[in-house]
Image (cartoon, grey):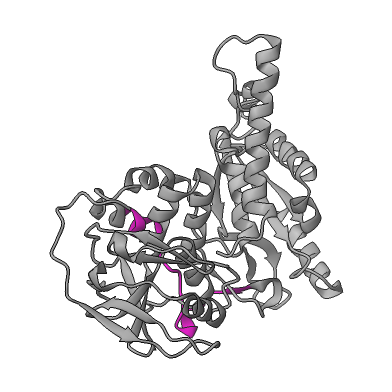
Amino acid sequence: MSTLDAPRQKPPVVCRKLSGTANGRRRACYLRAMGYFIVSHNAALALLAHMPNPRFGDSEPEVMSIAGACALSDQEAQEVIDRYDLGIETLDLLVPSRADRRRSQHVKTHLCTNELPAGSFISLGHWMGDLDAYVCSPELAFLQAAHDGDAAAAIYAGYAMTSDYRLDNLAPGEVTSRDAGMRDGRLTTKELIAAYLDRASKVRGAAKAKALLPYVVEGSRSPRESGLCMFMSLPAHCGGLALGEAELNKKYFIRDGYNDGRNRKLRVLERTPDITLTAKAEVGLDKVKAGLLPEVLTALIDYDSDAIHDGSEKIHKDAERRNELQLLNGVAYFTVTTDQASDYDKLVRLCERIRRKLRRNKRSIFNRPMSEEQRYFALKRVETKRFKLWQTVIEARQHW
């Protein structure tokens, strides 16, 4: 990130000698008066996605200057990556001056001379030696993703930072829930991101991040759930199918008759499908006017992962859940399996069925008259963008 501020006087530079490396050589690392490093960009997204909320229970944002930040050696960066099992090759770090910039096998630095708002960095405590560790806040990490990456990657980062899951390589499906009872909780919300972007309006990338934030949907419970929601709900210019407005893990209460006791109490079930799509009908409007169809239609989609929904007992529970959701009036229910999500053509066919059930038109992609050849290449461009979105958010294994 570049600066809009006048250059400031730098604090004194001190030198600290580090222990010898494995081959016996010694090196020196020049640091600012206060020794700390700041994990940023892609590495910050990975770190935040793998650890419990580092500011859980904090009431006031921490105010800290970037002026004392330093880079790490390859060995130190690898230790950070291994300690948190991030699965990435390079550790992104913020540095305050061009003299501190470096690029090596495991270190990539990013120059930042902006005065960033309070709450931009979160302390991770003491690291080792005379070094403290910090990580960019989820709000700043989203801004960085919007500035450096394409729209799909930035929106996906927004899903991850506002999700209810945490990556855990030892958990089934490598995902576990963020439970407030375990000193963990959602990293941030869209409201908090929007407030941060208002305070960071002069930082490069803030305007783009503001434009992309409305496409983020909070409350995802898995990376695959996020990817499917994006694929189905994003507008066509982002590569999505624009099937309707999306909500994640919305609760539904279903009346399921009366119990067998003497009091004859009404039995109410609470069910939470993964994705809820709502859309105004665009096909068959005569039936809507006649009252034969509702004006707003709803489709519920569940993702049945092989890692979570395997085994006879899980299969039985899934079937029972599907039958219960069928009791909702005016609602269509669909299931996406791992096989369907992993196969682009199968997923597109399923989404086409959802589109017909929601009575949506296919999105128009031609805003002007075209020749047959122009139309052919325009269709190819749209299909390429859609396939790239599927590759980015569904097929690829993200580290955040």
Say which quarter of the image contains residue 68: bottom left
Query: In the picture, which quadrant includes the C terminus?
Result: bottom right
Tell me where residue 161 appears, x and y as whole percent.
47, 62
Q: Residue at x 45, y 76 (%)?
A: 73
Q: Residue at x 58, y 68 (%)?
A: 88
* 300 shown above or below 74: above
* 154 shown above or below 78: above
Which one is in front, 340 or 122? 122
Q: Residue at x 50, y 45 (%)?
A: 150
Residue 121 in the magenta stretch? The answer is no
Tell me where residue 380 appears, x and y as whole percent.
69, 27
Which one is in front, 244 or 19? 19
Tell me where residue 55 appears, x and y as whole percent.
36, 76
Could you tell whether 335 is left or right of 392 in the image? right
* 172 shown above or below 9: below
The segment highlighted magenta reads: 175-194
Could you tell whether 91 is left or right of 227 in the image? left
Residue 180 in the magenta stretch? The answer is yes
Q: Evaluate whether residue 224 shows in this view.
A: yes
Say which quarter of the image contains residue 278: top right
Which one is in front, 271 or 34? 34
